[in-house]
Image (tube, rainbow, N blue to C red):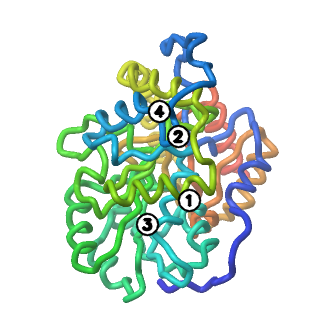
Amino acid sequence: MASTDTSRPRESEYLEWARAHGPIRFSLAFSGVPPCDVDLLSPSVDDFTMVADNEYGWPPLLDRIATRYGVNAENVVLAHGTSMANHLACAALLDPGDRVLSEWPVYDPLVTVPRYLGCEVDYFERREDNGYGVDVDRIERALTPRTRLVILSNLHNPSGAIAHGTELAALARLADSKDFYVLVDEVYLEWLYGWDGEPATAMNVSTRFVTTRSLTKVFGLAALRAGWILAEAGLATRIRRLNGLFASSMSHPAERLAARVFDNAEVLLANQRARVDRNRTMVAEFIESQPGLSWVRPEAGTIGFVRLEGGDVDALAERLEANESLVTPGRFFGVPDHFRIGFGMERAQLEGGLVRLESVLKEI
């Protein structure tokens, strides 16, 4: 699909909508999880020191990230959350007039940033009838001679679908032959950490991949703004230097607390996974009980993309908001007859949201 909007955006419509719809008691638009048990981090006064050798990232944190994902510390660039990581990666890889090829449906900021940087964005479809898989033949057909970057998310936002290692390997071969990079937003991928047969990060597959993550969605630590980029060493150096024009270095207390998260990652994840797995089953049973709803059930993660047959998703969202709940309208992902549902929250919040969703579905 060719780009139709070449104007330079000044905001993310989705993020402004999300900010305008703040705390809602039984929100199903929430895509992350509650904060992990911070007591397990055993924070100390030392964590709040303001003195550190962290101009290019605190070395103990860089080492922990590198070890977890099987790369070297020179491949790691710290950033203020995944959003800033994506911005830095795009700014380092793209020049005005370049073309970007993005997945569709797509998380709005992933394409808003390249457009802001003066690039044109084309799309390849991750089809619902193919489980939202990554079709490399479809990507190849959508490339142009000016395509410098392909963008995708894994787990896919909004569907939660997995881009498996075999798909990534085929995409890497295409990137080598056509000379482009691939930016993979992996903010939800930690849910798969340790799965047999799947790479810990796309960077394990090829240096054509540049990947981004943070502690936000899986550990529930959005307030830390602790994110990072994994890239081949030369590109990582360029991104570090470019960051001098943006945030320069991370808050050192955030770096130290993030290092403690990595030291306790498996315990923290185990607690979150158990709840999310139960919630996913609850949501699947609910959707299967509703004649007007359907989805591709995600294997992991905290989000799914639901089709509303013959209904008005924006009207649904408005009615839900009036009843202390909310879903994310699919128009923010380019698919107006769908909505994204989140299920990483505590059970009582999820149950309350589903009760209200069922009631509004009966009304409309």
Which quadrant, please, contains the C terminus?
bottom right
What residue did someone put label 4 on?
A: 58
Q: Label 4 sits on what residue type?
A: Trp
Q: Label 2 sits on what residue type?
A: Glu
Tell me the quarter of the picture where residue 163 sits.
bottom left
Please give left or right for residue 19 compared with residue 252 in the image.
right
Mark sitting earlier along the chain (1/3)? 1
State how far apart marks 1 and 4 are (Cα): 21 Å
| Mark nearer the viewer, 2 or 1 | 2
Pointer 4: residues within 10 angstroms few (<14), some, or many (20+)?
some
Residue 87 got which mark?
Answer: 1
Please give left or right for residue 87 compared with residue 238 in the image.
right
State how far apart marks 4 and 2 are (Cα): 8 Å
Q: Label 1 sits on what residue type?
A: His
| Mark nearer the viewer, 1 or 4 | 4
Pointer 1: residues within 10 angstroms few (<14), some, or many (20+)?
many
Tell me the quarter of the picture where residue 116 sits.
bottom right
Q: Residue at x 32, y 85 (%)?
A: 141
What residue did someone put label 3 on?
A: 151
- Given residues 232 and 313, the one toward you in this image is 232
- Residue 288 % position (x, y): 46, 47
